[in-house]
Amino acid sequence: MNNRKIGEVVLDLKNISLAFGGVKALTDISFDVREHEIRAIIGPNGAGKSSMLNVINGVYTPQQGEIIFRGQHFHKMSSRKVAEMGVARTFQSLALFKGMSVLDNIMTGRNLRMKSGILAQMIRLGPAEREEIAHREHVERIIDFLQIQSFRKIPVGRLPYGLQKRVDLGRALAMEPSLLLLDEPMAGMNLEEKQDMSRFILDVNDEFGTTIVLIEHDMSVVMDISDRVVVLDYGKKIGDGTPHEVRNNEDVISAYLGVAH
């Protein structure tokens, strides 16, 4: 658990319902996210976790409910608008450019912040060149922060899976988000890789002050690093509270944990 100060509610999801055809993915779900916290979303496979993340970052439009982000009310979020408002996301299945270097992959996260046009960037006119140097310096700081300096020129496709996940995190951080959505950042990792990623997530939260919403299957990780946990099962909310409260919630135990521990 972190010691940084948790602030006011920055994201409030109210009565969100989402269906595909006749299949209900989410039913009347409400929860909020506070400034500087690590907020976990957990639940069995098919519980609606990724659907909820897709609602937050504008991929899906809910049939019912609203999203309040920093005081603004939305029924529908667009992915572009969300990014411009300071929300970044990593994906469960890596969406990296495998033939491009680590440095260039993380640079793609700076696109929203590039002011010069594509043509100016290509021929590197004065202001565009100065801008690119500034962006590269920012990316180099992220590379140092994630301790991947020795891989910066290597094509991402040649890196071990755990390091590819770290590059994915770096690309999201390059957007300088105030809210970071992490979709199973530790899926497929071994114990050592999970420990490294947990530490980086805590450091991002602590040093950058970034608010984090996290989907994760590994319960020990969730209980170690989260401030609050919301639990979904079959698209419905069955628990919400601190890790201790959720761990001792009878509905959660029977639906997901199997045993109280």
Image (spheres, grey):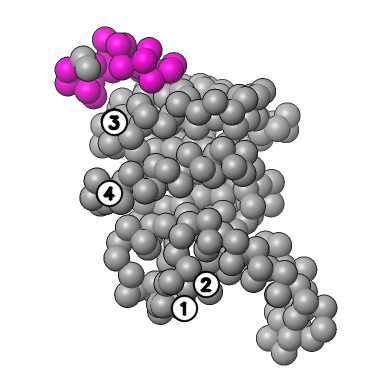
Query: Can the viewer see residue 25 in this picture?
Result: no
**Residue under numbered circle 4:** 192
The quadrant holding residue 248 is: top left
Q: CA distance from mark 4 to mark 3?
A: 14 Å
Who's the residue at 56% across and 38% down the image? 206
Who's the residue at 51% across and 22% down the image? 31
**Residue under numbered circle 2:** 103
Amino acid type shown at disc 4: Glu
For the residue labelled by badge 4, is the local secondary structure a helix, a strand or a loop? helix
Report the quarter where the N terminus lies: top left
**Residue under numbered circle 3:** 220
Mark 1 or 3, nearer chain start: 1
Q: CA distance from mark 4 to mark 2?
A: 24 Å
Mark 2 or 1, nearer chain start: 2
In the displayed structure image, the side of residue 115 where residue 30 appears, left or right: left
* Spot occupied by residue 3 in the image (x, y as percentages of width and height): 54, 26
Q: Which mark is residue 153?
A: 1
* Spot occupied by residue 130 in the image (x, y as percentages of width and height): 78, 77
Q: Residue 187, relative to residue 12: is it above or below? A: below
Query: Where does the magenta region start and end?
Result: 238-259
Residue 40 lies in the magenta stretch = no
Q: Point out the residue furthest to the bottom here.
A: 123
In the displayed structure image, the side of residue 6 where residue 234 appears, left or right: left
Q: CA distance from mark 2 to mark 1?
A: 6 Å
Amino acid type shown at disc 1: Lys
